Structures are given as C-alpha cells and as structure tokens.
Amino acid sequence: MIKQYNIKSLAVRFAQIFTQPLIAILIGLTIGAAVILIAGENPLNTYIKMFEGAFFSPFYFMQTLTRAVPVTVCSIAIIMAWRAGYINLGVEGQMITGSFVGTIVSIYSPLPTALTVMIAVACGLAAGALLAVFAAFINDKFNVSIVISTLMMNYVASYITSYFITFPLRDTSNDLAIQTKEIPDVMRLPRLIEGNTLNFGFIITVVLVALFVFINYKSNFGYESKMTGLNPVFAQYGGVKRRKVMYMSMALSGALAATAGMLEVFGVKYRFAEAMFTSTGYAWTGLMSGLISSLHPVGAFVTSVFLSGLQVGGQSVQRTINIPLQVATLIQATITLFVSIRLLAHFRAHRKSKIPKGNIKGKGAGDA
Amino acid sequence: MKQISKRYPNGVLANDNVNIDLNEGELLAIVGENGAGKSTIMKILYGLEHPTGGEIFIHGKPQVFKNPQSAMKQGIGMVQQNFMLLPPFSIAENVVYGSEPKKMGVFFDRKKAVDEVRQLSGQYGLSIDPTLLIKNCAVGLQQRCEILKVLYQNARIIIFDEPSAVLTPQEVEGLLDTLRQLAGMGKSIILITHKLNEVMAVADRCVIMRGGRHIATLNTGETSIQELSSLMVGRQIVDKEIPKLDKGHCVLKVKNLSLSGPAGQSIVRNCSLNVDSGEIVGIAGVSGNGQTELLHMLVGLLKPDDGEILLNGKEQSGGEVRTIRDAGCAYVPEDRNTMGAALDATLTETLLMAHQYKKELNRHGILNHKSAEESFAALLKEYNVLHSSLKQKSGELSGGNLQKLIVAREISHNAKLLVISEPTRGVDIGAMEFIHNRLIEQRSDGAAILLVSSDLSEILKLSDRIYVMYEGRINGEIMREEANAENVGILMMGGVRHDKAV
C-alpha cells in the first residue's frame, strides 16, 4: 500500500520535472520544422538525418559525447554559482583564461613532465577561479552586479588572450592560424578509442558530475549554498556566512569553467587557438542545459549530450542537405527560451520575497 | 432578509455543506482554527473562489459571483487583513480609487473626492482627515481608510478578516465601536477572528467552524468564551498554570543599546534590559516601534551603533550570528516566511538550519542526512506538525504548522536564551496553546525567554515581567502582578504610568 503510494508520488514528481522540458523540446522542434519547410526541405527527413548523424552512428555519437564534455562541465560550473543565487555569465571568460594559462604553462615550463602537468592544471584552475572571485569581490566591496561584471569580463579575457597568441606566444610555424604551439604529447589525455576524438576527458566529466552531486547534496557547503540561493535572509538568520558562500561558490564555478576549457585543450585540440571557445559557444550551450534541466547536475549532463547532439547532427545535415547549422542552434535556443520562462518567473518570485523587511545587515559587517 | 447558504464539497473538502445566514444590520462572527474553512467560505462569498456545490442567495435571489467585482456590485465588500493601500497617496485618493469622481468625464476631480470622503466619514462617524497621506497614517487610520473604501463602494455586507491583528488595545476598542455603529446603521457585518473576547463583545451571533464543517451557530448572549473555544478546538482548552519560580541568574543583559537607520533616524534608543534564567520577559509594543531591530541586534543580524549585549556575562555586541548562536541563543523570528524558513526548501532542510554545525550531524563538512531525518521525524511528531513527508517543501505547510516547526527547531537547541517574536501570529488556538505550553516548559527548565508580541493578551498571559517599547525606547517596565491591558496599553501609546506620574 505504502509502496504503491511512493511509486505514484515518484511518477508525479517525474512528470512535474520533465513535462516542461519535453513540451519545450516539442515546440523547439516544431519551430525548427517550420524553418526547414520554408527552406524547402522535408522536416521529417531532415530530423531523421539529424538524429542519425548525432546519436545512431557509433562514430558520430562519440563526436557528440566529445562535444558534450566541455558543455557539461560548463553547465555544472553555472549551476554551482546559480544554486547559491549568483548568476555567473562569465563561464566563457573563465574557461578561456584558465585553459590559456594551463596551455602556456604546459608548453613553456622547464620542469619535469609530471610536475609540469600538476602545476599547469593548478595554475589553470586558479586563473579561472580568480577571475570569478574578482567578480564576487567587486560585488562585495562596490556592489557591482555579478551578472554584469562576469559578462563583461568575457570580452576582457577573450581579447587579452587573443593579444598573447597573436604576438608574443604565437606558433610561428603556421602563418594562417592564430594559435599557440601544441602541448607535448605526453601531456595529452589518452583517447578512449583509436581514431575518434572521444578521450579520457569524458570519464573525468562523469566523475566531476558525480562529485558535484555529492558536494551539493551531502556536504554542509552544498546545503548552505542551496539555502543561500533559496532565501539568503533565512540562511543568514541560521548563521550561514553569506560572503563565504559567495566567494566559495564563485571560486568553484570559475575553477570548473577552467576545467571545461582545459579538457578541450588537453583532450581534443592540444593547443590554445583564437576564438576556440567563443565560436563554439560551449559556455552558452552549457548555460542552456543548466536552465533546461532546472539546475539539476545529472539532468544537465543528459541535456548537454542532447544539445551537443543537435549541433553535431546539424553539422552532418549541413553537409548532406541544404539546411544550415543555424537551424540546430535555433531549435536549441527555442527550447531554452520556453524552459527558462518558467525558471525566471520562479526566480523573480523569489527575489520579491527576499527583499528583507527592516534593514538587515545585507552586505555583511562591512557597511553596517 | 439575506439568505446565504452554501454547499461546497470538493477534493480537499475545504467546506463541507456549510450553511450560513446573515440578517440585515447583524454582526455575525465566524470563528474556527486555521484550516477550519473560514477563509475559504469568505473567499467564495467575495467571489475569489468558486463553490463546487451550493448556492448563494441575497435578498432571496440566487447569485453567482465570478469575481470580486461582481460581488461588490451586489454590495459585498471585504476589509482585508493586509491593507491594499497606496502609501504615497492621500486617504481620499485611496478611498475613491477604482471609481473616481471625474471632471468632464476624463480628469480626476480631487476636490470632489475629498468632499465625498469627508461626507462619508461624517455619515458613519469615522473621523478622518481625507487629505492625509497614507504613509503618514497609523495602522488604525489605515484600517479606517480601508473601511471607508468599502463603504464608498456602497457595500451592505462587509467582511472583516482578522481586523484587530495589527492594532493596539486602544485602537481595537475604537474598531469594535465602529463595527457596532455600522451594524446599527443597517450594514451587515461578518467578522472573522481568532479572538473570542472580541466576539463576545460585539457579535450578535457566532458561527463556529471546524474541519470545513459548520459546527454550531450560537447567540453570543447565551454562550461563553469557554464554550466557544472548546467547540472550536473540539476539546476542552485548559490554561496551563504558570508555576512560580525562584529568581534565576542573569542570562542576558543589555545596556544602552542604540541603532540609527540609513537616514540617520533613531530606530532603537538607549535600550537597557535584562532577562534571567527561568523567566519569560515580554516586550509589548505596537509593531514597528523598534522591537524587530532590537532583536536583530541581539541575535547578530544587525550591528548596534552603541551599547553592550552581555550573554552569560560575555560581550556579544556586533558579533556574527553563528558566534552568538554558539554562545547559547536561539531565535524564532517574527516572519516565518521571509526569515524563519525557505519556502522552497524541504522540511529536512528547513529544520537543519543552524543545526548543521552540530557534531552528530556534521562530520568534517559532510552532513549525516539519515540521522538528521530520524531526529527531525521524531521532533515533528512531538510537536504534532501535520506533514506528508520530510521531503515536502516547507511552503506547503499551513502557517500554523510551519510556525510549530520553527518553534520546534529553535527550542530543540536547548539554548540558555530563547528570543522569540510573534510566536503565535496567524496561528490557531490549538497551536497557540501548544506553543505557549512549550514556552512555559522551557521556562521551568531554566531557559531565559525574551518574548516580543504585538498581541497584548499573549504578553500578559506569559510574561513574568513586561517591558513596553515605544518609538525605539523602553517606555516602562511592569511586573506580572501589576500588569493589565490598560496600563500596558497606555505605555504602548507613548503615555506614562499613572501611578508613577501622580
């Protein structure tokens, strides 16, 4: 009797969680179909090709998974901060900075390989984290919105690294491409199957997702950051140190973003190249999967694979049928839009209830 | 004659075959615990919700109310518990809002509005200056403005939802006079309330509801508070004896605590007080006289500008919340929704707050959910908190149950000092009795309790000693033996004690 009830309530919960994303996916595919029709192709045919070229051929499925690695890690980077109530839109900049620093250290370090790898990874993580923490710091001290500052720093990170790889650190053996030299062979992540880009980074991603689930659902830090995100006044009332949670979650978010970039460099590209993260839009696809999955890490993983598949499938359709890759991006954006309508309504409702009555020590002890 | 009868069976069965009738010029009270279905049935009458069965008759004619506007057209008005006023506008502007007098059909005729409101207030004896801005009005005046608003809409049936919850004792007297007067002028009044003494004072008849059912309709002349309360709860309510205790040692000592607001205005001025173990000290006062800020300084949420807070002899002024909690202070905040809980968090998460550092639940930063859930399940059972699962969201609990949960969470710290604010606001009589008894038990166990409440009867019932706050300062201290509604009420209004003044 009791068990039956549990299954029923589980089914209800399941339905509650998945109804909106599924409807959004349907709407996204419908709008995509309309565009494909206008372009003069058969939508059904195109979709079949698209999904075949993303999920149902072993080679392409592994392409999809390869692409899902940075997307997933970016999405958990975003979720890490968002759970605590901070919207880090600077994942792209943090991933650029972190992977740039990591790449440069691995290429130019005179130390033995093992030591170099450790230092490179540590420097990369620190660079990503520092960039995010800087946003938290200017929020703390000067009340600058984290959303704005992180978003703006994407450009700063992109253009500064662009300068370095265009001039002092450029690989001069190739006149056409603006990029660094390749990292040494021994530092590259091993491929899982020969002849395919899928590499050890995928396993690291799965481990990171598992670790993330553990930290957020079992640890005190996960609890306190979730409570801060749900109701900062409640958290403060219970003795949670708001500033500590902000710095911690932003630092972890930035470090995760750096990880996403380094996995791409060490696992796939083996060098840092101009616009390698801005043109691929990993961070923004990651943001979308975070939103679509309502900030649940495992959901974000699955969604990241799905969205990566849309891109990979879109590429293969572009080659065979006269449908541009942008259709895949359009579908992706439509899905996110229809999912995030609910999420943002939710978020705003929260914000309203959060406005503290009286003058609670809002910004910590500094300005009281 | 107005015959309102209603049948309302649905899935949850908020109202089960309820029949209520109201006569012209009658003052009918509806009493019942939280969740008894009072609000639901009034929302149906006001058109905010639709009955699944049954009919409403006004003057013998059946009516269907799609929305509050259609109810208003039939002369039904409601004075809400939370005022729906626009603070930067004048009383007159607020009263006519929605059906303003117009000049040439387009422009707002402010002068006419003021005249009409002045005339209306004269007609019903609700003296008021229509040109005053709402933001400069005391709560009592704001309520008067709400009543005028309803009268301006030509309401013949006026519903009052917990109208005395926000008022001082003197203002409550004024309100009750107004209610009598309105009924005397032929208006039919429905009064929803928890406070049975008000029912006895003004109502002609009283409807008692419990569990969605109509239990009884009694003439107030033929009943007593005891009968009403036992009908409401379904059992006998016995006031717990508050045992005499010997004087304990000093737990909390506050000296000359002051706080200014962002604009430099004084919010708390030179407050000094002390609380001993085994003592309940009440702080009476109309809400907004600095009580909240005083408590927030005590628990570390606000930094005082000046003064000392000694908890067990140790200076805590300006300390972090967690340091003060660790030093032995638990706090039940006045607002359970914005501070006492995160409504989207699960019950476990809500109960865990401030317990998450305890050794038995936290090993090197990893929380032991299993043992937390075990102890929380027992705690909720002990406090009789109705819930379906520890995983449900705290926002799904009814107000009274959420309040009991928060009280349970804070009492289970077994702190030396329990700071508790509005412990029974919006809570039904059964839960109120329960919470009061728990506080009395804590007192017997040697806890020092600082109680802030805008409900004077609660303060008078529980407190060994009463401080009265007015405009941020302590305006007097009265021992239990000498305290009564009158002398505390005068201090709440900023007056001085007669016996001292003479």
Image (spheres, rainbow, N blue to C red):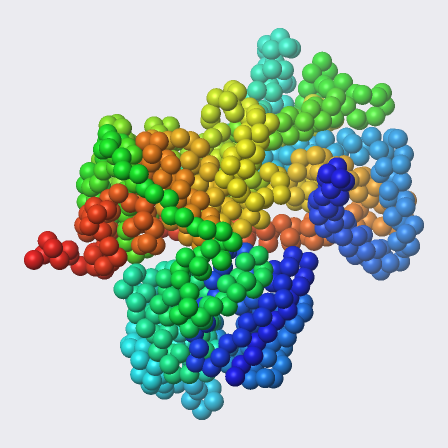
Residue for point 32% across, 65% down: B172
Q: Who is closer to the viewer here, A137 or A277? A: A137
The residue sitting at the left extreme is B502
Q: How many marks?
A: 0
Q: Who is closer to the viewer here, B54 or B203? A: B203
Query: Residue B177: x, y in percent?
Result: 32, 73
Residue for point 90% across, 52% down: A44
* B35 sits left or right of B195 in the view: right
Query: Residue A212: x, y in percent?
Result: 63, 29
Q: Which quarter of the figure has residue A9?
A: top right
Q: Who is closer to the viewer here, A269 or A174? A: A269
Question: Is residue B190 visible to the viewer in this orientation of the structure?
Answer: yes
The residue sitting at the bottom extreme is B104
Question: Is residue B474 visible to the viewer in this orientation of the structure?
Answer: no
Compared with B6, B253 (above or below) is above
* B415 sits left or right of A33 in the view: left
Query: Residue B166: x, y in percent?
Result: 36, 60
Residue for point 17% across, 59% down: B495
Q: Who is closer to the viewer here, A128 or B82? A: B82
Compared with A129, B336 (above or below) is below
Q: Which quarter of the figure has residue A105?
A: top right
* A189 sits left or right of A39 in the view: left
Residue for point 46% across, 51% down: B236
The residue sitting at the front extreme is B222
Compared with B120, B395 (above or below) is above
Query: Residue B33: x, y in percent?
Result: 49, 56
**Dividing the image into 4 quarters, which one contains the C terminus of chain B?**
bottom left
